[in-house]
Amino acid sequence: MHPFKAAMSVTALMALTAPAFAQEVNLYSSRHYDSDDALYAAFTEKTGITINRIEAKADELMARMEAEGANSPADVFMTVDVGRISRAEERGLLQPFESQTIEANVPAHLRDDENLWTGLSQRARIIFYSEERVENPPRTYEDLADPAYKGQICIRSSSNIYNQSLMASIIENHGEEAAKDWAAGIVDNMAREPQGGDTDQLRGIVSGECDIAVANTYYFARGLASDVDGLTSGIDGIGWVWPNQSGRGAHVNLAAAGIAANAPNKDEATALLEFLASEEAQAQFANANNEYPVMSGVPIGEHVAKMGLFIPDNETPTASFKAHAADAQTIFNEVGWD
């Protein structure tokens, strides 16, 4: 056989037998849960693609990606809350992708309009209260500013991304002036200066320091699932309200991910996102951390199921979280919400 023809045959054979993927995907993640390890291992077993993880806080990862520039090895950026991933979008750190799997599995209101990111699990930000001390708890986010609840509310600081996104949704739905009045009402109703994380707000109900708290669902579900100091011992006395169920629905914080702007392994990155949004992965990704899946029909975990189902806010556009971020912080500063 002619040497050139032989070489062509070998090349053709290699093309037919070569793996479809580069065998690795570089994940920059601010989500730090040991429960995800088994899921990533299952992805590697199924596809042969190794996941190289870099874990840090979201702002640190974004700064790293910016410093790395066009040479960044990042393929997937994963974080918690639409506000955070919107910052990555605004800084040009994400690129659009196409996936029929994700479009089929993830509702449109849990994805970016321009396909820059997709939600992977949900945590609703809801109202908790002392069943012993509160006879008529707030039924909406707007009700939290009612003077009837003066001196009763525990809530995190204004620097918290969850509260910033909630404020952005208030601005989107009611306008800046009404949002400012609402924030001022919350400050007037605080039982104490903002401090600690969401679990600390729930602990405040148990200790009697506050009667009402705002927190994400998975912190409460975690108190049901395991022994959380200062919470689990008194958790039976805490009730909850799914806010705005007769209106726009409950505000949702998402674990979300997108493909990095300079991803060297875009096909592998897409494969990872599709896997995490698949039925086989959704239950573990969400339930192992006491969250709600983004894919409908996936069974929810035992402890999350105790909290029941809810109507999410699918009316407020996710783009509003980015659009109103600066205004939200300005309002917080003006009303003295530290």
Image (tube, grey):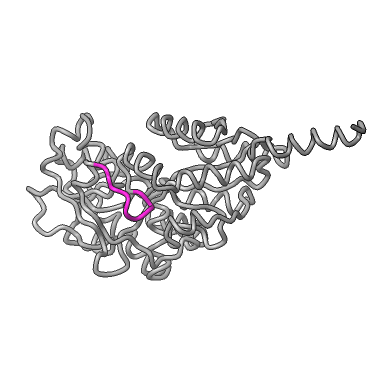
264 is higher (above) or lower (below) than 332 = above
- In this picture, residue 208 sits left or right of residue 79: left
Q: Main secondary structure of the magenta part?
A: loop
- What percent of the width, then of the height, locates residue 151? 20, 51
Number of marks in the rendered image = 0
- What percent of the width, then of the height, locates residue 306? 18, 46
Q: Quadrant of residue 149?
A: bottom left
Residue 298 sits inside the magenta stretch: yes
Q: Look at the image and give the residue range highlighted in magenta.
A: 293-301
What residue is rendered at 57% in x and 46% in y?
Answer: 270
Residue 114 sits inside the magenta stretch: no
- In this picture, residue 293 sits left or right of residue 143: right
Q: Quadrant of residue 16?
A: top right
- What percent of the width, then of the height, locates residue 98? 58, 56
In the rendered image, is residue 196 in sight? no
Residue closer to the observer: 184 or 161: 161
Residue closer to the observer: 252 or 14: 14
What residue is rendered at 61% in x and 39% in y?
Answer: 63
What residue is rendered at 64% in x and 45% in y?
Answer: 266
Q: Quadrant of residue 202?
A: top left
In the rendered image, is residue 315 in sight? yes
Q: Quadrant of the N terminus?
A: top right
130 is higher (above) or lower (below) than 35 = below
- What percent of the width, then of the height, locates residue 232? 17, 34
